[in-house]
Image: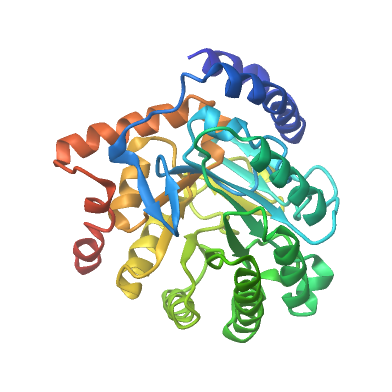
């Protein structure tokens, strides 16, 4: 309620400036919350899962794009997230696209961005992850890294950029997501095609196996993040490709370039970039359902897009997501939205008679697909 009272004031300012201030505040506040204890996490064994060889205290995670450079790692478990995805991270630091590049669409509960993978680079991010990993006490929530290519790297096929960032970040990350679906780096979405993506996946798989043997441990889980604007046949092909290359999972989905159904002013909708938030809700859920059915439940699916409340997250789980991420809801609903969603999921599990999330995941995917 406090955040909703303050939101009109926050929304008067520049969106990216507001985000930078929020990140700076979280960076300073997180260590205090870690020491004194935060009231926001919901701890209940029914929300816990063992996936990708990792322990997730809840299915709700921070989507990539919010903490691009691992600046506020301690904040995310303190706010109640069960995991966080950092990035997108490129091998070298880069400033991204010129400002303004982030726009609010309040009439649609959405954001429009063309950030262009602005981040501090793999070296700095790896240092922060290692420092946080060394300082963490007690249970630690998983942290994944979303990998991207620079504009030059994307033009050259992406392999070298993805490999360079992967190698540097391998020791400190819990899992990796190959981002070939951002609309804001020219040529990147072309890497979703079979030929380029196969080359990237083969390169990363070889490096993953080599690093695991050297460290005497298992390879890092590897997932791929795809666009919501793909045709059904393209989604099927990518699921098949993920299975062929023994990927651990998929993230569905990135921002959309579509403006269909949006009611925000044309001056905003005419801006280049991808849209996130409520307009993606149904589209990303339908993608999850299709991927779950196509893959036969053999891939760990992460659902992202339009998650604002417990019902949104619940529908993602029913459609086949084992994990759910949010980003835009933090901007519109404030930090307590994580606790509200986790509590709401427990209420729905009680009503459904589900003793674990495994009983929920994908339970309506086949039925809805037939319908």
Residue 81 in view of the camera? yes
Name which residue lies at 67% across and 40% down.
134
- Is 51 left, or right, of 7 in this rendering? left
Name which residue lies at 64% across and 19% down.
32
Position above or below: 69 against 333: below
Position above or below: 33 against 197: above
Q: Toward which corner of the image does residue 257 lie, by quadrant?
A: bottom right
The percent position of residue 148, horizontal first and vertical second, equals 70, 63
- Of residues 365 and 112, the one nearer the viewer is 365
The percent position of residue 293, horizontal first and vertical second, equals 30, 70
Q: Toward which corner of the image does residue 177 lie, by quadrant?
A: bottom right
- Is 368 left, or right, of 335 in this rendering? left
Q: How is the image coloured?
A: rainbow
The percent position of residue 68, horizontal first and vertical second, equals 70, 46
- Is 124 left, or right, of 71 in this rendering? right
State how many labels appear: 0
- Give the quadrant of the C terminus: bottom left
- Of residues 236 and 220, the one nearer the viewer is 220
Residue extending farthest front = 216
Position above or below: 92 against 106: below
């Amino acid at each position: 309620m406090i955040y909703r009272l303050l939101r009109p004031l926050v929304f008067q300012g520049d969106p990216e400036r507001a985000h930078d201030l929020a990140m700076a505040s979280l960076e300073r506040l997180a260590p205090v919350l870690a020491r004194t204890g935060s009231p926001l996490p919901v701890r209940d064994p029914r929300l816990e899962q063992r996936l990708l060889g990792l322990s997730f205290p809840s299915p709700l995670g921070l989507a990539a794009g919010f903490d691009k450079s691992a600046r506020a790692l301690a904040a995310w478990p303190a706010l109640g997230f069960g995991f966080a995805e950092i990035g997108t991270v490129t091998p070298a630091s880069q400033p991204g696209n010129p400002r303004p590049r982030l726009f609010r669409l309040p009439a649609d509960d959405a954001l429009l961005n063309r950030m262009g993978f602005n981040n501090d680079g793999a070296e700095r991010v790896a240092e922060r992850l290692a420092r946080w990993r060394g300082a963490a006490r007690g249970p630690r929530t998983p942290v994944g890294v979303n990998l991207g290519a620079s504009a030059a790297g994307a033009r050259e096929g992406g392999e070298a950029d993805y490999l360079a960032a992967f190698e540097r970040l391998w020791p400190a990350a819990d899992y990796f997501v190959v981002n070939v679906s951002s609309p804001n780096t020219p040529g990147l979405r072309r890497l979703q095609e079979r030929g380029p993506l196969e080359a990237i996946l083969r390169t990363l798989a070889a490096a993953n196996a080599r690093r695991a043997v050297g460290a005497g441990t298992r390879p890092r889980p590897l997932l791929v993040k795809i666009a919501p604007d793909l045709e059904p046949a393209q989604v099927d092909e990518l699921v098949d490709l993920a299975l062929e290359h023994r990927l651990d999972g998929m993230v569905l989905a990135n921002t959309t370039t579509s403006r269909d159904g949006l009611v925000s002013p044309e001056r905003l909708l005419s801006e280049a970039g991808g849209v996130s938030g409520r307009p993606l809700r149904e589209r990303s859920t339908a993608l999850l359902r299709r991927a779950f059915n196509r893959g036969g439940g053999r891939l760990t699916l992460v659902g992202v897009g339009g998650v604002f409340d417990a019902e949104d997250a619940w529908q993602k789980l029913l459609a086949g997501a084992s994990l759910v991420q949010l980003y835009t809801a933090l901007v519109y609903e404030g930090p307590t939205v994580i606790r509200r969603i986790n509590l709401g999921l427990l209420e729905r599990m009680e009503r459904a008679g589900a003793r674990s999330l495994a009983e929920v995941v994908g339970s309506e995917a086949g039925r809805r697909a037939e319908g």
